[in-house]
């Protein structure tokens, strides 16, 4: 009887010991894009290493997986994706690995779009997710800084579930990041406040969340159907519309050919503005906050300069 | 309209320059029987530009051009070897290997260079629509220089292009001329591919030369026809691209193909002896008739076998004749079908209306809260689901209508077209027997 109790106590002490020490438990988190990786990094601090499958400055929608990616995902303790079809190639990778942890609802799988207020829900999706077909929403939701609150909440929850002992640390790290983000967010909004409703033309439809947060009016797109070069009729119409609406700048994103944007900017006599669509896609966007600092500064500069 | 004109003027000027030099080189390439050499050279030059890019040089910088030129020269040297290899293996096989290896190498290099994907996209599709005045000036001066070289060296260049073993020349001189030809060819293609893209450059090169060769074997006539047809096709492609709101490169390639088909038809029915012309016209008419009958028979049989499957021709017939699925349903079903069609449009309209409302709230009036955005999104999801449901109803009823249509329309059409095909086949067999007996056969006048 006493021996039994002792054994129980020892067992309890041991399990406690295991839980208390960080147990060499540097988690391995794998994300599909650098944006999600940057957000995981600020929440996890040094309790996890983070790696993005898509390298910085390459287009996640045109990504082709490599053999190394299978290994990378297989060894991950947590897999975080953008979702909404943006990183559709991950599905094939997960199926290939066949590990239940990475399936929908698995303990090592997080779709970061969960809970985001989605914009531009489209009808008719061919993709059938779990027997229930969803409309497809615009996937560029990380470009609204307020959505980082929701994204980091999901990340923190998954990290805490995997490492309950690190709960306080994770919560504190997230709170510190959000406080910094909120302070900057107010400054960003102030900087752009004078230009509320400013008319812009963007290359692709990548900026609805950004436009909503910072009150911009993106009237049209250079390439409305991704991958199909604009027709002359479209460009002529764009120039006429842009002139009439008083467009202030052309927003060009990395990975896309610049010719058409440059032509329209030239015809309208407005600046061609390079905005970063994701962390690391241009110089000076090494983390999530820097991404916005870069974009806000570039926008403010372009909109603040009076047109000739 | 002035915007349109100013947008199309420069691409047209560039196209004229492209046609003048490419159609001429196309004649050479056709004679050498290595039509894909341009792709191989263009891809090698792209590889050079990509290597430069990976090393941190802009494609338009002197270093970028230097790399492209170096790789083009290597390509020219490799293509020069194909003449020697022609005895053992088809030259096209060698050219093909060169092309795929250069393409794969480009992809591997791009993989290491950030934002290289944009570069590869440009090489494939080009962007002739946005060509700049400076680029056109550069093209014209380069092509003029190469044109002058080809004019003074026309005799040996044409000789080595036209024969596998040119008489009275040593292998070394032949190889020298080959190399010079491929080098100048590579220079032209390397400069044009970055602007017009691989697909369009191939069309500039081959299609006008082929059209010219249809009408004559004399180089002056071939060139005159090729140049005028090439310029006309470019103008038609650009105009069509504007009028029908199409992407320019693909529209121009299609226009070139259209001109080739028209030229082939013109050759068969216009530029020919009157007797032969009548025979050709009859053959063409019969061929069109036979094709129409085969299509009608296949489509109506498909409708009989599987009425609920996709019926592209039946759908076209319904649309053209106004005999929609509604006509083959009873009154009750027809009402459900019409309502479903109406509701699909209505639900889609609701989704669009909500999108427009959300969009304008981004920058006008009070911003929508996250909760309002979520509510809009969930309404949109519901409307999408409802529209999907209505589409499903339409599909089921359309299947039901087609099952009836199969008997009312499909069966008679199948019978008529099969009988028609039988008649045609008998006529054709009789005509062949007559032809074999030697009567009614007409020899070509040319």
Image (tube, rainbow, N blue to C red):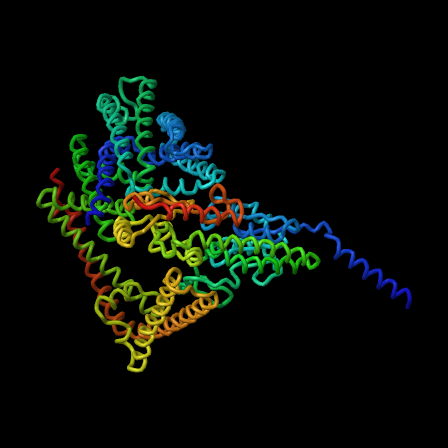
Using the image, determine if residue A168 lies above or below residue B161: below
Residue with the most extreme bottom position: B332
Q: Quadrant of residue A20?
A: bottom right
Q: How many marks?
A: 0
Coordinates of residue B281 in the picture (x, y in percent): 14, 50
Residue A302 spot, x, y in % from top left: 38, 46
Q: Residue B222 in the image: x percent, y percent?
A: 18, 34
Q: Quadrant of residue B292?
A: bottom left
Query: Is residue A244 in sight in this rendering?
Result: yes
Q: Residue at x 32, y 65 (%)?
A: B311
Asked whether residue B87 is in view, the answer is no
Query: Quadrant of the image for the C terminus of chain A?
Result: top left
* Residue A286 at x, y percent in the picture: 53, 44
Along the line of sight, the residue nearer the viewer: A173 or B116 = A173
Residue A190 versus residue B311: which sits nearer the camera?
A190
Image quadrant occupied by the N terminus of chain A = bottom right
Who is closer to the viewer here, B393 or B34? Answer: B393
Left/right placement of residue B150 relative to residue B79 reads left
**Relative depth, front residue between B315 and B204:** B204
Residue lying at 25% horizontally and 51% vertically, measured from the top left? A240
Question: Is B432 left, or right, of B273 in this rendering?
Answer: right
């Amino acid at each position: 009887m006493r021996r039994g109790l002792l054994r129980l106590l020892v067992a309890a002490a041991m399990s406690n010991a295991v839980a208390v020490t960080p147990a060499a438990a540097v988690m391995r988190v794998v994300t599909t894009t650098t944006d999600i990786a940057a957000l995981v990094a600020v929440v996890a601090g040094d309790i996890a290493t983070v790696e993005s499958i898509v390298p910085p400055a390459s287009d996640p929608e045109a990504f082709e997986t490599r053999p190394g990616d299978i290994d990378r995902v297989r060894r991950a303790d947590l897999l975080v994706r953008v979702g909404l079809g943006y990183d559709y190639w991950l599905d094939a990778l997960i199926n290939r690995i066949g590990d239940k942890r990475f399936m929908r609802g698995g303990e090592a799988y997080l779709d970061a779009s969960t809970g985001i207020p989605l914009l531009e829900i489209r009808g008719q999706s061919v993709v059938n997710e779990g027997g229930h077909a969803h409309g497809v929403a615009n996937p560029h939701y990380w470009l609204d800084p307020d959505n980082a609150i929701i994204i980091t909440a999901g990340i923190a929850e998954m990290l805490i579930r995997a490492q309950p002992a690190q709960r306080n640390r994770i919560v504190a790290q997230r709170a510190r990041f959000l406080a910094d983000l909120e302070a900057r967010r107010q400054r960003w909004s102030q900087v752009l406040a004078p230009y509320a409703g400013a008319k812009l033309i963007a290359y692709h439809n990548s900026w609805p969340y950004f436009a909503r947060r910072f009150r911009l009016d993106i009237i049209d797109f250079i390439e409305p159907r991704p991958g199909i070069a604009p027709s002359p009729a479209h460009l002529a119409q764009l120039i006429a519309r842009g002139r009439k609406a008083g467009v202030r700048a052309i927003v060009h994103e990395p990975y896309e050919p610049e010719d058409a944007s440059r032509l329209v900017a030239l015809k309208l006599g407005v600046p061609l503005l390079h905005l970063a669509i994701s962390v690391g896609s241009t110089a000076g966007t090494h983390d999530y906050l820097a991404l916005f600092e870069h974009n806000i500064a570039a926008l403010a500069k372009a909109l603040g300069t009076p047109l000739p | 309209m002035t915007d349109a004109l100013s947008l199309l003027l420069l691409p047209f000027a560039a196209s004229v320059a492209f046609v003048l030099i490419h159609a001429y080189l196309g004649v050479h390439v056709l004679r050498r029987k290595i039509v894909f050499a341009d792709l191989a050279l263009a891809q090698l030059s792209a590889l050079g530009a990509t290597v430069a890019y990976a090393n941190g040089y802009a494609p338009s910088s002197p270093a970028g051009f230097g790399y492209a030129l170096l790789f083009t020269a290597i390509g020219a040297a490799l293509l020069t070897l194909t003449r020697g290899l022609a005895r053992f293996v088809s030259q096209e096989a060698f050219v093909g290997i060169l092309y795929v290896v250069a393409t794969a190498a480009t992809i591997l290099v791009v993989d290491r260079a950030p934002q290289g994907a944009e570069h590869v996209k440009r090489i494939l599709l080009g962007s002739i629509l946005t060509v700049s005045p400076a680029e056109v000036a550069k093209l014209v001066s380069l092509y003029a220089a190469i044109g002058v070289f080809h004019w003074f060296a026309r005799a040996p260049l044409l000789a080595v292009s036209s024969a596998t073993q040119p008489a009275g020349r040593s292998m070394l001189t032949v190889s020298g001329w080959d190399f010079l030809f491929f080098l100048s060819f590579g220079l032209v293609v390397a400069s044009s591919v970055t602007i017009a893209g691989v697909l369009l450059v191939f069309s500039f090169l081959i299609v006008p030369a082929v059209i010219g060769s249809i009408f004559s074997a004399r180089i002056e006539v071939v060139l005159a026809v090729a140049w005028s047809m090439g310029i006309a096709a470019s103008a038609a492609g650009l105009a069509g691209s504007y009028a029908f709101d199409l992407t320019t490169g693909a529209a121009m390639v299609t226009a070139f193909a259209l001109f080739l088909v028209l030229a082939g038809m013109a050759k068969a029915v216009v530029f020919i002896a009157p007797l032969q012309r009548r025979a050709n016209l009859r053959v063409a008419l019969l061929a069109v008739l036979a094709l129409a009958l085969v299509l009608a028979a296949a489509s109506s049989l498909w409708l009989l076998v599987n009425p609920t499957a996709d019926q592209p021709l039946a759908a076209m017939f319904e649309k053209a004749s106004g005999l929609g699925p509604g006509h083959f349903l009873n009154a009750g079903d027809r009402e459900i079908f019409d309502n479903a069609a109406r509701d699909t449009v209505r639900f889609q309209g609701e989704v669009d209306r909500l999108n427009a409302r959300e969009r304008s709230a981004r920058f006008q009036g009070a911003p929508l809260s996250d909760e309002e955005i979520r509510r809009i999104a969930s309404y949109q999801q519901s409307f999408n689901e409802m529209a999907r449901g209505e589409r499903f109803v339409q599909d089921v009823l359309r299947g039901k209508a087609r099952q009836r249509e199969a008997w009312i329309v499909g069966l008679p059409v199948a019978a008529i077209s099969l009988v028609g095909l039988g008649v045609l086949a008998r006529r054709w067999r009789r005509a062949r027997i007559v032809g074999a007996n030697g009567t009614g056969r007409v020899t070509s006048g040319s």
